[in-house]
Image (spheres, rainbow, N blue to C red):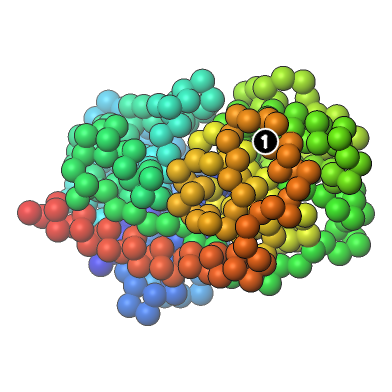
């Protein structure tokens, strides 16, 4: 099987979607009889490092995303095959899949925030309201990152369940060997000996206002509550939903390289994820891979990926969050059980689920 895959999210700083594509490509590269995969970039800038395998190649041609988006908004030209050559499947990894000539289309829909929380999305996400239905009208097969997301997609777009496959994200094995930050990283980031951590884009759906207010309340009750470290790029919108955090209580190191991110999470007293909405919630599983306790909002995605290995808190209950920050030891499980839970999420398993989805898409397309 020959696959065209949108690798554009690998360019620049890698947020959740970029890390998903990176893990998927590694998983596909590690399959002994995996599909030949052509990495397509909707950009004229940048290069993507290729894994050391013969079955992963760059696509032969590239065009800028803005030009392609304008063309695809008006017509079905140019087809994806103009960039890739002949492929059996073209996989749109980030809410958009181009029209094809003969190939089956597969589309990853990470979440429906563009419908559920339209005021919190910006940039390209504004166009998902039209791009996703247009792809569905062409009969593409959908990949959802959780069963919770699959159910939401089928209900929202009235799709038959056969058109939606579930492929969980994986956790890079390096998370399992991550260690707390050394003295040089602590000095560079200004990290205290003990701290709580959040990881992700600093944007409205992450519900950071509740976390910051709860943390302030907890610190007022007890000086034993450690500072809060919010890791991630600045994001967009009203990220604090109120007053910004006190710099004496909250550290903002910004975007961190993967190795530094792993170290900071591994050294935390607990990971705190108060999101009001997630498609998957990768930081929850990554933190579990280090053995760190997890305190997270009680939402469908977190329940699916975290199982019984995290402390569930109502996303909007500031008092409950403050109590949890005062008592992170209430997080269920042990370091060993959390690592065992995380070990069930691998990119090799995810890649196999993707290939099954590709096969399903081709069969439906040819029937």
> Image point 51% across, 74% down: which residue?
52
Which residue is disc 1 drawn over?
Answer: 320
Q: Quadrant of residue 68?
A: top left
Q: Position of residue 72 (x, y in %)?
A: 30, 32
Residue at 60% in and 29% down: 316
Residue closest to the eye, 29 or 145 = 145
Q: How many marks?
A: 1
> SS at mark 1?
helix
Residue 47 in sight: no
The answer to whether any part of residue 298 appears in the image is: yes
- Quadrant holding the C terminus: bottom left
* 10 Å crowding of disc 1: few (<14), some (14-19), many (20+): some
Q: Along the horizontal axis of the image, is 321 left or right of 88?
A: right
- Quadrant for the N terminus, please: bottom left
Measured from the top left, where is residue 191 in percent x and y? 87, 50
Image position of 113 (left or right of 134): right
At x 45%, y 43%, the residue is 300
Q: Nearer the viewer, residue 175 or 296?
A: 296
Q: Report the residue at 59% width, 68% height from top.
A: 337
Most extreme residue toward the left is 367
Q: In front: 92, or 190?
A: 190
The picture places residue 97, in percent across and down from the top left corner, at 33, 42
Q: Position of residue 163 (x, y in %)?
A: 22, 47
Quadrant in the picture for residue 263: bottom right
- Quarter assignment of residue 249: top right
């Amino acid at each position: 099987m020959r696959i065209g895959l949108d690798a554009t999210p690998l360019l620049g700083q890698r947020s959740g979607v970029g890390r998903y594509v990176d893990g998927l490509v590694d998983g596909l590269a590690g399959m002994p009889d995996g599909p030949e995969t052509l990495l397509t970039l909707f950009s004229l800038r940048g290069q993507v490092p290729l894994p050391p395998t013969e079955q992963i190649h760059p696509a032969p041609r590239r065009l800028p995303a803005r030009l392609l988006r304008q063309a695809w908004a008006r017509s079905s030209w140019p087809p994806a095959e103009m960039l890739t050559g002949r492929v059996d499947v073209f996989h749109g990894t980030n809410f958009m899949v181009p029209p094809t000539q003969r190939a089956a289309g597969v589309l990853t829909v990470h979440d429906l925030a563009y419908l559920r929380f339209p005021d919190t999305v910006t940039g390209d996400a504004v166009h998902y309201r039209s791009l996703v239905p247009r792809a569905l009208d062409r009969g593409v097969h959908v990949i959802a990152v959780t069963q919770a997301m699959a159910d939401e997609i089928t209900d929202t777009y009235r799709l038959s369940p056969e058109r939606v496959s579930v492929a969980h994200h994986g956790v890079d094995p390096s998370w399992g060997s991550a260690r707390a930050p050394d003295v040089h990283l602590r000095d560079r980031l200004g990290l205290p000996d003990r701290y709580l951590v959040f990881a992700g884009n600093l944007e409205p759906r992450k519900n950071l206002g509740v976390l910051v207010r709860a943390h302030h309340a907890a610190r007022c009750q007890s000086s034993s509550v450690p500072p809060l470290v919010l890791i991630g790029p600045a994001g967009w919108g009203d990220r604090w939903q109120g007053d910004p955090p006190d710099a004496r209580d909250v550290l903002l190191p910004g975007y961190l390289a993967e190795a530094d991110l792993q170290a900071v999470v591994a050294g935390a007293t607990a990971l705190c994820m108060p999101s009001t909405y997630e498609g998957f919630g990768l930081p929850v599983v990554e933190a579990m891979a280090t053995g760190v306790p997890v305190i997270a909002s009680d939402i469908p995605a977190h329940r699916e990926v975290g199982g019984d290995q995290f402390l569930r808190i109502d996303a909007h209950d500031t008092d409950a969050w403050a109590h949890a920050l005062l008592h992170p030891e209430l997080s269920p499980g042990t370091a060993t059980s959390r690592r065992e839970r995380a070990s069930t999420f691998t990119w090799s398993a995810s890649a196999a689920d993707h290939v099954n989805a590709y096969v399903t898409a081709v069969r439906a397309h040819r029937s």
